[in-house]
């Protein structure tokens, strides 16, 4: 049985009322537009962190989509539901203002309501680059890879790729998780992403786990995959917000060198092949 999100999107597409659905964002004129919602009780619990931490994570989740499309974030539309127990709305507004300034965004509009729970949805507009990066374009024999930060100053094993699935489970079961993990705060490296975007065949950010993202790539590109690494947590871990790339065999060495320059490892885990890919596990939040 398909998850409800997939059913909803496919029904919209069949109704001929959609345009550009299927990538991390959509290109309209000179801009890439992307949106993501953050709903209390679904995407987060308020006891998981301060308002500053929760709001900044939402900003980074949305920024990741813009960078994944090879664009530079510029403008922001904010939709906010303020719960009745948050009395200091000025403090809330100051947090959103500070985050917008920190990440070079101008808030240009949106909507604000009062409700029972805290919800906020961001729609970002990014200035598109000379070369867009999409989920389509993968060819048989292309390499599939993800980025993993190397052990450097201010880096811990808690921030390694694949750890977020453990942190998510701890948060859901016990309401706690490491505050210095990438689950608490995604780590984005825009300069590296934009450099790799320029030579990648295709790409997307990893929000639901590689096993889910591959099903999306397989359907769009009508391909299957030969796996080069044994599947473990790295394959299923959600909310990584690192890039999943496809590189031609001729660009792979250059891509590895670029990642290394930014103190990251480009982990090659599969090759594309003719065929199909069967999703055998449900998404973690369905």
Image (cartoon, helix red, strand yellow):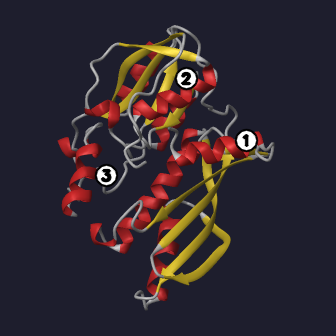
In-image side of 242 versus 275 (left or right): left
Front residue of this view, candidates 84 and 25: 84
Q: Secondary structure at mark 1?
A: helix
Which is more N-terminal, label 1 or label 2? 1
Q: CA distance from mark 2 to mark 1?
A: 18 Å
Q: CA distance from mark 1 to mark 3?
A: 32 Å
Q: Is residue 42 visible?
A: yes
Q: Which mark lies nearer to you, 2 or 1?
A: 1
Residue 13 shows which numbered tag? Answer: 1
Which residue is pictured at 55% across the width and 43% down the height?
Answer: 67
Which residue is pictured at 49% across the width and 71% down the height?
Answer: 119
Q: Residues within 10 Å of mark 2 (few under 14, many from 20)?
A: many
Q: Quadrant of residue 21?
A: top right
- The residue tagged 3 is 183
Residue 218 shows which numbered tag? Answer: 2
Which residue is pictured at 26% across the width and 58% down the height?
Answer: 172
Q: Secondary structure at mark 3?
A: loop
Q: CA distance from mark 3 to mark 2?
A: 27 Å
How far across and down, in percent of the image, does residue 279 sit? 45, 27
Which is more N-terminal, label 3 or label 1? 1
Q: Residues within 10 Å of mark 1 (few under 14, many from 20)?
A: some
Q: Which mark lies nearer to you, 1 or 3?
A: 1
Front residue of this view, candidates 109 and 4: 4
């Amino acid at each position: 049985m398909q998850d409800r999100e997939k059913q909803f999107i496919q029904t919209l597409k069949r109704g001929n009322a959609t345009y550009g659905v299927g990538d991390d964002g959509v290109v309209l004129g000179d801009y890439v537009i992307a949106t993501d919602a953050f709903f209390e009780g679904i995407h987060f619990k308020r006891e998981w962190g301060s308002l500053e931490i929760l709001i900044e994570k939402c900003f980074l989740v949305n920024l990741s989509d813009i960078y994944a499309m090879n664009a530079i974030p510029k403008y922001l539309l904010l939709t906010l539901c303020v719960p009745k127990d948050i009395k200091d709305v000025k403090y809330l507004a100051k947090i959103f203002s500070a985050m917008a300034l920190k990440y070079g965004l101008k808030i240009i509009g949106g909507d604000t309501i009062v409700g029972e729970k805290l919800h906020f949805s961001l729609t970002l507009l990014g200035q598109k680059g000379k070369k867009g990066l999409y989920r389509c374009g993968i060819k048989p024999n292309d390499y599939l890879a993800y980025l993993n930060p190397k052990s450097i100053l201010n880096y811990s094993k808690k921030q390694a790729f694949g750890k977020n699935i453990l942190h998510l489970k701890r948060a859901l079961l016990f309401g706690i998780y490491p505050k210095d993990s990438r689950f608490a705060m995604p780590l984005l490296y825009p300069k590296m992403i934009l450099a790799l975007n320029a030579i990648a065949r295709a790409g997307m950010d990893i929000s639901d786990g590689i096993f889910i993202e591959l099903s999306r790539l397989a359907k769009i590109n009508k391909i299957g995959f030969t796996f080069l690494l044994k599947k473990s947590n790295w394959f299923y871990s959600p909310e990584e917000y690192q890039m999943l790339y496809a590189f031609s065999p001729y660009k792979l060495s250059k891509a590895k060198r670029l990642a290394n320059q930014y103190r990251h490892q480009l982990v090659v885990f599969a090759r594309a092949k003719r065929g199909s890919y069967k999703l055998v596990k449900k998404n973690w939040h369905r």
